[in-house]
Image: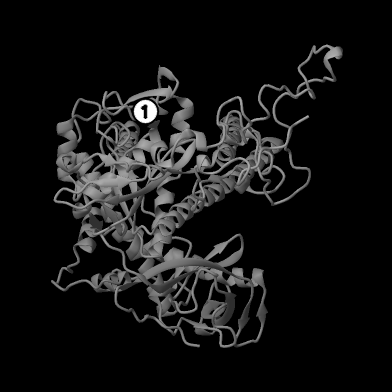
Amino acid sequence: MAVRRKIALGEGETGRVACAPAMAFRGLDTISGEVLNTAALGERVGWLTGLVESMAAGVIGGHWSRSELILLSSGIAPSGERLPSNAWMALRTLGWTATVPEGLYAPDRVRRVAEEQAGRVLRSAQWRAELVDAVLTTWPAGADPMKRTEEEWAALRDTCPQGAAVPASVFRSCTRQVLRFETAHRRLPADLCELEAAPGGGRQVVLAAADKQLATLVRCEDDPARYAVLTVRLPVRPDPRTRADWRPVRIRFRLPPTIDATAALHAPTLRLRGGRLRLDIAHTTAVPATRRSGHSRAVAFDYGLNTLLTGGTLTPTGGIQPGVLTDGQPVFLRMNGVLAKADRLRILAEQLWAKAAHLETLLDGQRALGRCLDPATAAKLALLRTEHARVSKRRQHLNMQIAKAAARFMVDHARATGASVIYLEDLRDMEARGKGRTLNTRLSGSVRGQIVADVRHQAARHGIAVVIVPARGTSKYCPRCLTAFRHHTAPDSTRPGWKWATCPHPDCGYSADRDVAAWQRIGARGLQHQHLTVLDRTTGTYLIRRTVQELDQPVRHPKPTHPGPSELGPRSVFADRTKAGPMRSSPVPRQRRRVPAPPGTPASTGPGGKRPAGRPPQSPTHRTRRRGGRQAPHTMSTPNRHTPRGARLGAGFHLHTHATPLKQRPRRDPRLFSHRGEHPPPRRKT
């Protein structure tokens, strides 16, 4: 079954390009008939990857200069000819071709792949080069460049192309890089090409630059929805000499379940991962088109530390200057246990790195003195480096799972409420400085950027737009009256803090969690500035870069719809709700339970015992993936007090993730029903 390159789009649809990984474990040499196992297939792909990488690195290193970067990014050749959009065609137009190592033979399509990879690297370096030029041009003389004034920041953004859209954290990172160069060389660098060495070509093979003479991709005829076949020419030796050393290898692999049967497949990218062949398969599917504005229902979310996400639903009202209406019922996603596990892995990685650095210092001292290296120390250093790499891989995998779970929670909530847009705050400029060692570390280790990328990927499948709004002032002002909040530690404490917010306005008095108030301001700002939403062409993200103070209106909360006491009738028609009568949530009043009784109870008054201290233990007794009905409170603690239970037994991090259900059952007023009818009284406890 042939692979379609394009898909038919209906009205209101657009093409969504995504990439999914797949693994290949065996191949077939179509000329010799030899079946290649995982090791043999990985060996041949490794020979091709090494050859392509060396040729691409030669092109990049030969043209790593500021003038040539400007020439390539200008899009115009010296002859006045317009450069093609394909990187390999642009390089060949300029005469920057890849050279095959002497004595080796490589097809022209392999050279084309190397030129495509080199051209992409050189084109991507132009943005960093412009950023470095802007920092060097506006470098403050005789002052600390990390403490720029407002005028210096304005000049820096005016000098950099599209500097208004560049986060301040990016400028600070570039400034630190220049400072390190100045400390080492006692002068400022001339440009990016002097500041950074020429990058490599990348250990991958981009087959998108090749044609059918090098690689073909088709779906299997027997099962086109689940399997595909890639036929690619691979070398049979590490140093191919002739054309006969390149043979077509047929690779059958399983398509990932995220690729639909109607998706159009594109040429994959080959890379080795742990000695196995990995294919990054690009595919295009038809999805509903997203909208910049015109949203009638939205959801907004605010990031947090202990509570990862706090959000809710908002709807705009009509009128010349529309307001925003919300039900004020937030939803939460708490991952305290997972974040505690990530914190433990971070501490372990830091300890391993410190031990390895100490051993490296000892070995450097032995080399400086001309002594033979201690074999035991060298072996221990290698072991620590390997263990650190494994821990880093576990941290990366855990962060990916956190980001995917958070994105899935937001998209599912938007779909359940019928929202067409998700508003998130722009925290690219947020840096962990001056907030204490623990808080700085937790802020630096968060995965906010990956969460945004994942939610954009998942929301596009359902036609839901993701818009980034400015975060300034969202946690500072009251959503109901726009008065500056007073922040303190808890609702029953006046000690200054950051968790709880109270409005000091006498007519408002709104009191809520800081994150609960922030998501309302984020959603209101996004809905009231819909007409200012723009599309960032470089990242494909919807942004609201500026806000208008006059458009910010308070968020309105509707009055409760349940009937009041005057509508329900006189109090006498209801069951007894006083403390003297039986209630569902309390035992029989004015009658203490005799068993167990408090310590020291006289034996003459009846049987007694020792009162249990707290809740009964709920530790799992066997390895299971099924979560119990309730969890102990310690699963919601901070990382310093968290004790792993289900995760330690192999049940996964989902046991420590708590999310608000998408749909809640409506609450019934207990005064509408009698205890003897719908709600019988509980049995007496004896």
Badge 1, how many Cα within 10 Å: few under 14, some, many 20+?
many
In terms of image quadrants, where is residue 381?
top right
Looking at the image, residue 420 lies above or below residue 364: below
Label 1 element class: strand
Rendering coords of residue 465 (x, y %): 33, 59
185 left or right, relative to 497: left
Q: What residue do we see at 45% from left, 35% from top?
A: 570
375 left or right, relative to 447: right
The residue nearer to you, when weighing 593 against 497, is: 593
- Can you identify the residue that label 1 sits on? 501
Q: What residue do we see at 40% from left, 56% from top?
A: 417
288 left or right, relative to 159: right
The residue nearer to you, when weighing 530 against 452, is: 530
In terms of image quadrants, where is residue 496?
top left
Name the image quarter holding the C terminus: top right
591 left or right, relative to 234: right
Rendering coords of residue 480 (x, y %): 28, 35
Q: What residue do we see at 29% from left, 23% from top?
A: 504
Looking at the image, residue 506 lies above or below residue 304: above
Tell me, yes or no, if residue 592 can be seen here: yes
In terms of image quadrants, where is residue 546?
top left
Rendering coords of residue 177 (x, y %): 33, 39
The residue nearer to you, when weighing 681 against 346, is: 681
